[in-house]
Image (cartoon, helix red, strand yellow):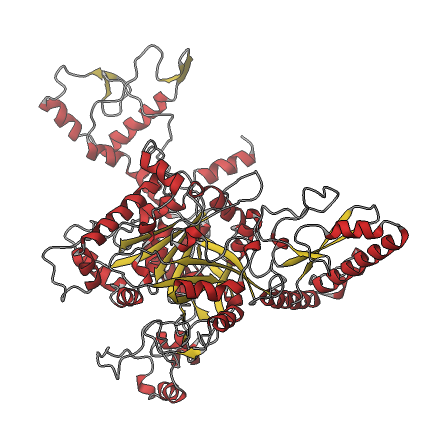
């Protein structure tokens, strides 16, 4: 044996005792035994359980057993290769495992092997800590100093590692740092103070631990996850489910007579861009609509931006008033311009005091000073909670929203038309689930609320509105119909099969009650309701109009649901009091009932490839219930995305993203300016030798797109070509007249507005010459200039409206 092999063998056997020899296997002859380590075997007696043999076994010494085992192992090393493979033992003998052994003597004979094994297991083979052995998606930054953030099976090992590291470190001074000495008594006050400029969503703390946060549009939002997730999020949108928090979207509510609302909003939209507020399916409350808003009587110029809207269902149980409700959902960057224009067309300039979305006032400067000037002995000490209103401290609340000051009015009324405009921003939470498994996650996480009718005391129950609702037979019947339709969604493969914009109202129980112990992946059940006629009817006709009703439209009920929510602490305490740990918690009538709205979001509608890609559901919830629904969705397999995933979803769906893809509206112009500023700062931060030379690359505008200059050059070029062609050809007047005959083109400027309807082509069937066909987001809010090129064919140039 060479020196290298000897060293390798010695290193391998360094932990083995000298009296242990590793054999190829444990073999023994069933009929042969060795006596006192001797080499001669003797035949066992016919009665294996006789007392003589037992006494002989117990009187054997440790030395004789060890010697016998060693000789057994040495004899078993002799192997013979036969047809069936390698076999141990002398040739011609049958090898069998003994039927029974004495545990005590067997363990004593191999005590050295067991101690060597325990010694080898106790020694670490690597220098990595225990939390570094976890997969990346389970690691948390707090694991290095808080062992409770690790799984329970690893907490004891991590505690030993932490104690060992503490002894190795130098002892620090017991004096607290300056930041710890001036820590705030109430953390909620600190959170509220930090939200004065940029508001937090209810899921902000969850996002801040896992996302890169950015400050946009008056909010602090999650831009992208801290881990690699681009491909994973695309897979989630394609075959699984992606979850997003869209609670920063703004909601404007209009109350009044239907005719007055439609009359006031008609100057802000046009039928040339598609459906309006008066669409039949949308007006009944059955579907969600979308359109482009312009300044009053300024179409096709001065576009404000895209919005979505839903009407409250006409026939609702117990509602006999003629007043209708309309919710307009829009991006926060578009809110100020659209709100001012709606107030102008509805003549709602008088602020009114309403019980809807009353914002809590912020602390005054004197109150803030009194909080900071507390005695030093009270800093850092916990105080008992007092129930009196004067000494009560504020709980976690969001003051106002990111698009308005909390002290500004939030509701306006028109004395002439009777229309009331209310700003419901941050009064509801909106989640978006994208992907084919979105409805499967909804069915698994949400359960319809149980009906309580008999033996319930209305005064003692905190959810009195639900008890009163259950006493109405029509309301109970409607609730059961909604529950049946919600269960039918389990037989649908993808949300794209349902009609676009379908609305379903529902009242569900607390989703925290049936929260699973571990995170799992929900799979659809294609066999469920596959051949049911009700599923086919649902796919063809959609949800009935009456089933789109939801108590979410009633602000008093939403306020009661928010105030009477059971805290997580009380819920966990009731779980700990269960007789059988881990069993289902039953609260009965004390369980919270939450009204929600489910809105189907259509996916990709352009092109033939992957139609319906990116479809899903939007869930509208009352405020205060975001985390109660957020965690159950994640525990069913939903992956969370941020603003970056929103842009990627729009790109793959071939739909314009707000506000970057709308350079006509004021929000798009402001977004382009901010983007150019950020790109220029990033360019200047690089060393001069490492900056790309845009002059040599031929890039005229590397940081922004000069739409105004570009369209002006195009118009001047087309005008010059028209003049030259008219002067050179004798039939210039005729060709000019032919170009002006294009439908929809005004005679003086030879321009026409590109319709927002995707089915409206730019060229007419009577003029098949080379008119450029354009579709996509560029058609919205732009003008087409029609002229004749050098080849004599028609030329179309897109130019934004004059708001640029």
The structure residue drawn at horizontal position 43% and vertical position 52%, both measured from the top left corner, is 280
Q: Position of residue 231 (x, y in %)?
A: 53, 46
The structure residue drawn at horizontal position 50% and vertical position 73%, both measured from the top left corner, is 344
Res. 529 in view: no
* Relative to 495, residue 171 above or below: below
Res. 562 in view: yes
* Relative to 78, residue 631 above or below: below
Task: Pick out the residue farthest to the right.
Answer: 728
| Viewer-closest of 550 and 458 | 550
* Relative to 573, residue 352 above or below: below
| Viewer-closest of 402 and 346 | 346
* Label total for image: 0
Q: Quadrant of residue 81?
A: top left
Q: Quadrant of residue 159?
A: bottom left
| Viewer-closest of 483 and 122 | 483
Q: Position of residue 121 (x, y in %)?
A: 37, 44
* Relative to 772, residue 564 above or below: below
Q: Is residue 102 left or right of residue 520?
A: left
Q: Is residue 89 left or right of residue 462?
A: right
Q: Position of residue 565 (x, y in %)?
A: 26, 64
Quadrant including the C terminus: bottom right
């Amino acid at each position: 044996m060479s020196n290298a092999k000897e060293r390798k063998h010695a290193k391998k056997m360094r932990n083995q005792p000298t009296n242990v020899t590793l054999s190829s296997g444990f073999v023994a002859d069933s009929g042969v035994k060795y006596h006192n380590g001797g080499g001669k075997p003797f035949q066992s007696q016919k009665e294996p359980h006789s007392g003589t043999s037992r006494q002989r076994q117990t009187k054997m010494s440790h030395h004789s057993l060890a010697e016998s085992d060693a000789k057994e192992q040495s004899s078993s090393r002799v192997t013979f290769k036969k047809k069936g493979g390698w076999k141990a033992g002398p040739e011609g003998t049958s090898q069998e495992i003994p039927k029974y052994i004495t545990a005590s003597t067997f363990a004593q004979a191999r005590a050295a092997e067991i101690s060597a094994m325990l010694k080898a297991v106790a020694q670490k083979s690597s220098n990595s800590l225990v939390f570094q052995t976890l997969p990346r998606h389970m690691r948390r930054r707090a694991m290095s100093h808080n062992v409770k953030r690790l799984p329970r099976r690893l907490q004891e090992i991590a505690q030993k590692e932490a104690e060992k590291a503490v002894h190795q470190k130098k002892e620090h001074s017991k004096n607290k740092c300056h930041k710890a000495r001036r820590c705030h008594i109430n953390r909620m006050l600190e959170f509220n103070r930090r939200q004065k400029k940029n508001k937090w969503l209810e899921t902000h703390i969850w996002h801040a631990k896992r996302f890169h946060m950015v400050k946009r549009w008056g909010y602090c939002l999650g831009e992208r996850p801290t881990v690699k997730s681009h491909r994973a999020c695309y897979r989630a949108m394609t075959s699984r489910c992606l979850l997003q928090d869209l609670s920063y979207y703004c909601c404007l509510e209009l109350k009044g007579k239907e005719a007055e609302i439609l009359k006031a909003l008609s100057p802000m939209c046009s039928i040339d861009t598609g459906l309006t507020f008066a669409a039949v399916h949308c007006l009944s409350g059955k579907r969600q609509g979308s359109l482009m808003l312009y300044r009053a009587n300024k179409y096709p110029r001065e576009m404000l931006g895209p919005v979505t809207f839903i009407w409250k269902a006409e026939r609702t149980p117990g509602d006999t008033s003629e007043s209708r409700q309309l919710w307009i959902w829009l991006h926060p960057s578009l809110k100020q311009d659209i709100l001012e224009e709606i107030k102008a067309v509805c003549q709602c300039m008088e602020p009114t005091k309403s019980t809807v979305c009353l914002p809590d006032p912020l602390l005054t400067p004197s109150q803030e000073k009194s909080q900071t000037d507390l005695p030093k002995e009270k800093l850092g000490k916990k105080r008992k909670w007092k129930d009196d209103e004067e000494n009560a401290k504020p709980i976690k609340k969001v003051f106002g929203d990111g698009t308005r000051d909390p002290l500004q009015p939030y509701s306006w009324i028109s004395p002439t038309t009777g229309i009331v405009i209310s700003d419901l921003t941050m009064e509801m939470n909106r989640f978006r689930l994208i992907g084919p498994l979105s409805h499967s996650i909804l069915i698994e996480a949400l359960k319809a609320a149980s009906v309580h009718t008999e033996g319930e005391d209305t005064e003692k129950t905190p959810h009195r509105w639900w008890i009163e609702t259950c006493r109405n037979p029509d309301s109970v019947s409607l609730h059961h119909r909604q529950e049946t339709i919600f269960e039918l969604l389990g037989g649908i493969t993808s949300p794209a099969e349902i009609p676009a914009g379908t609305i379903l109202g529902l009242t569900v129980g607390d989703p925290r009650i049936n929260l699973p112990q571990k995170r799992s992946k929900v799979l659809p059940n294609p066999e469920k309701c596959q051949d049911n006629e009700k599923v086919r009817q649902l796919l063809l006709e959609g949800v009935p109009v009456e089933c789109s009703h939801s108590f979410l439209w009633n602000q008093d009920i939403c306020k009661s649901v928010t105030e009477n929510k059971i805290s997580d602490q009380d819920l966990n305490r009731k779980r700990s009091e269960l007789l059988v740990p881990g069993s289902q918690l039953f609260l009965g009538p004390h369980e919270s009932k939450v009204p929600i709205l489910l809105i189907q979001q259509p996916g990709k509608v352009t092109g033939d490839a992957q139609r319906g890609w990116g479809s899903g559901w939007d869930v509208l919830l009352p405020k205060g219930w975001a985390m109660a629904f957020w965690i159950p969705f994640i525990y069913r397999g939903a992956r969370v995305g941020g603003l970056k995933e929103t842009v990627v979803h729009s790109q793959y769906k071939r739909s314009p993203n707000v506000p970057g893809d709308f350079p006509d509206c004021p929000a798009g112009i402001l977004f382009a300016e901010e983007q150019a500023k950020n790109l220029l700062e990033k360019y200047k931060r690089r060393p001069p030798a490492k900056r790309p030379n845009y002059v040599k690359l031929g890039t005229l505008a590397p940081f922004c797109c000069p739409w105004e200059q570009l369209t002006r050059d195009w118009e001047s070029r087309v005008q010059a070509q028209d003049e030259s062609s008219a002067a050179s050809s004798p039939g210039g007047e005729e060709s000019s007249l032919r170009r002006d005959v294009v439908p929809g083109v005004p005679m003086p400027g030879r321009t026409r507005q590109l319709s927002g309807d995707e089915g409206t082509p730019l060229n007419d069937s009577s003029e098949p010459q080379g008119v450029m066909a354009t579709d996509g987001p560029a058609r919205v809010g732009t003008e087409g200039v029609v002229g004749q090129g050098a080849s004599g064919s028609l030329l179309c140039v897109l130019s934004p409206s004059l708001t640029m």
